[in-house]
Amino acid sequence: MLLNKSSPLFFPHPSKPRPTSINPQATNLHPQPSTLSHTLHLHPQPTPSAVHRHAHPPPMTVGQLALHPCLHHRPDSPPSRSTLLPLFPHPTRLFFSDSHPHPTASHPHPPASQTHPRPREPPLHRDPREPPHPRDSPPPRLGFPSAQGAKMEVCRRVHGEEEEAVKGKNKEKSSSQWQSVKNGVFFSVFFSVAYFLLHRWREKIRTSTPLHVLTLSEILAVVSLIASAFYLMAFFGIAFILHPFLSRTSDDDLQIITHPLPSSPPPLPKDDQDVVRAVVSGAVPSYSLESRLADCNRAAKIRRAAVEHLAGRSLDGLPLEGFDYESILGQCCEMPVGFVQIPVGVAGPLLLDGKEYTVPMATTEGCLVASTNRGCKAIHASGGASSVLLRDAMTRAPVVRFSSTKRASHLKFYLEDPHNFDSIAVAFNKSSRFAKLQDIKATIVGKNLYIRFSCSTGDAMGMNMVSKGVQNVLAFLQNDFPDMDVIGISGNFCSDKKASAVNWIEGRGKSVVCEAVIKGEVVKKVLKTSVEALVELNMLKNLAGSAAAGALGGFNAHASNIVTAIYIATGQDPAQNVESSNCITMMEPVNHGKDLHVSVTMPSVEVGTVGGGTQLASQSACLNLLGVKGASKESPGANSRLLASIVAGSVLAAELSLMSAIAAGQLVNSHMKYNRSSKDITKIVP
């Protein structure tokens, strides 16, 4: 049966048979094109019960149903399946037509126009006495008993459910009130009889009456005391005993990571699959995909698929999409198959040299950012910190060999002669307009000579710049020392990415000192310790303890933590945290012991604001947050020097906070709270 807003909607009368199908033509309910707003298909099914009892109910149109107060949708929009279902009894199935522009509800029965053929036309010459065919008879008219009955039928279930919900809430409320009354009664009984028995016990002691002789009232009091005690223990004790088990179960549930992992890349096209097979077979080298395909993103997808095939393991947890692989070509990483995500937090504001800085830190260690932030708060509350840049020079030390030690000493004396420095500097400075040779030191080991060149490199970290300058100088020296044999451009006397005394003593990169005076009240209120405790702990831990361990540049609490976190966030070389973390932390009482003077001396902070990973979008954004993005146009090298000072200031804040936590005995508790993961990665639900 097809219905529109102007067509009456009827339910079957119980006294008439219910048809198995409804003929649209026989019912004369076809919607007119001019008035059709939406089409409904109604398929009645046989049922033993009748819906309504009246014989001739007035009709109710679909438009009237749409305006019914129990339906919560706009009258000018077609009623949805969920809003119309309460209007019809269970035997009726309702769904929208496929021609309706709104989404349709699925139904096992197709529309009537598709399932029921047109009625068979009666024969032209049929015997009038012959009874008509059942299919030629129109179906019985359907109707409501009354408008009021229809409304009652519509609202019955809605109001019934609301009444049930209200009854349930009232029942729960009354039960809770009754439970409170019972608890109050038992509490009163418990304390009353306890007081009564204690009073009787004192009376018996005073009158020398045996305690085991009990009166009837005392027996009732003892029974009441035991009963109330059992009730209270059962009511409160069971929940207390089960609490650890319930909490453990809840924690176990929370350990399962239910969020979806990054979606795996879509299947590769056929052409890319052919390239994958070529890479797997060895016909095409994996490193040559970028040059062969001229598409870095496509090369990364193909290489990833080949790696998964060769390794027999999935890389679904490693993101691939959303990264510009063109930006790292020939600069940051070769043969990429994805990228790793590291959270970035911010500490601060760090008040350094009169300016505030919000410090980005990329780390997976809990408590690190929070601890640094607390140190920044203490520094800010005490008036800020100040920094001094002592030296700015990157180093490179080639190793050359001569036939004898005497011949090697000739070159050593030549290089250290001030009269020859200018000619050597001219050859060195050809490598870059920012490269400025500052110093040359040489040391002999047997017949081998190690030459350590130091130069400023502007806003770049400068390794490539200084290496190119060293090559120019070696070519220049070959003219006067043709017997010099260059063994290597780097002889580890530099020294790069290794803990070494030469960097600790001579420095490498930026040599920075940062200091602050922390007020005594700030030490107590913010750092939760005392000046005396910090001074003693620093002497025994950072100085004497590190010396006992034979530390080389490690006279600090955790400078490497902060250096590495800032390096990753700002695109520095994380491996250079080895020498960049060289730091000695000093703490001394000042102002008659009321305040604390704290300082960090870092002789080899290696940073840059141009080149390398600083060109990547995320790292560039972190540099921009600090105000040191790119090269300084006004003063070359100013941005990199400022970044080194910010690193030292952040280390100062972190040293202050960690030492305070150790002095106050808070280290273990804070790490148990913020740096202990209970998630089991083996239970990850994809």
Image: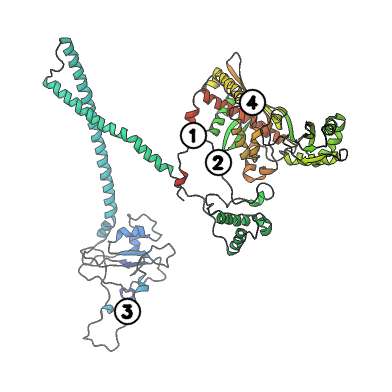
Residue under label 2, please give it. 343
Distance between mark 2 and mark 3 Cα atoms: 71 Å
Which quadrant is the N terminus positioned in? Answer: bottom left
Q: Indicate which disc, 4 or 1, sits on the residue closer to the N terminus.
A: 4
Could you tell me how far apart the alpha carbons at marks 1 and 2 are, in whole angstroms?
15 Å
Along the viewing direction, whichever of 169 and 457 lies nearer the viewer? 457
- Residue 526 visible (yes or no): no
Closer to the observer: label 3 or label 4? 4
Task: State which mark lies toward you, 2 or 4.
Answer: 4
Within 10 Å of disc 1 (Cα), the crowding (few <14, some 14-19, many 20+) is few
Frontmost of labels 4 and 1 is 4
Q: Colour scheme in the image? A: rainbow
Mark 1 residue element: helix
Query: Mark 1 highlights which residue?
Result: 674
Query: Could you say which quadrant of the image residue 203 lies in?
Result: top left
Whole-angstrom CA distance, mark 2 to mark 4, is 29 Å
Point out which mark residue 584 bears.
Answer: 4
Chain-order first, disc 2 or disc 4: 2
Q: Position of residue 26 (x, y in %)?
A: 31, 75
In this rendering, is residue 428 above or below 119? above
The residue that disc 3 covers is 119
| Left or right, 93 with reference to 205 | right
Q: CA distance from mark 3 to mark 4?
A: 100 Å
The amino acid type of the residue labelled 1 equals Tyr
Mark found first going from the N terminus, 1 or 2: 2
Q: Amino acid at mark 4?
A: Ile
User: Which amino acid type is marked by label 2?
Assistant: Pro
Assess whether mark 3 and mark 2 are in contact (beta carbons under 8 angstroms).
no
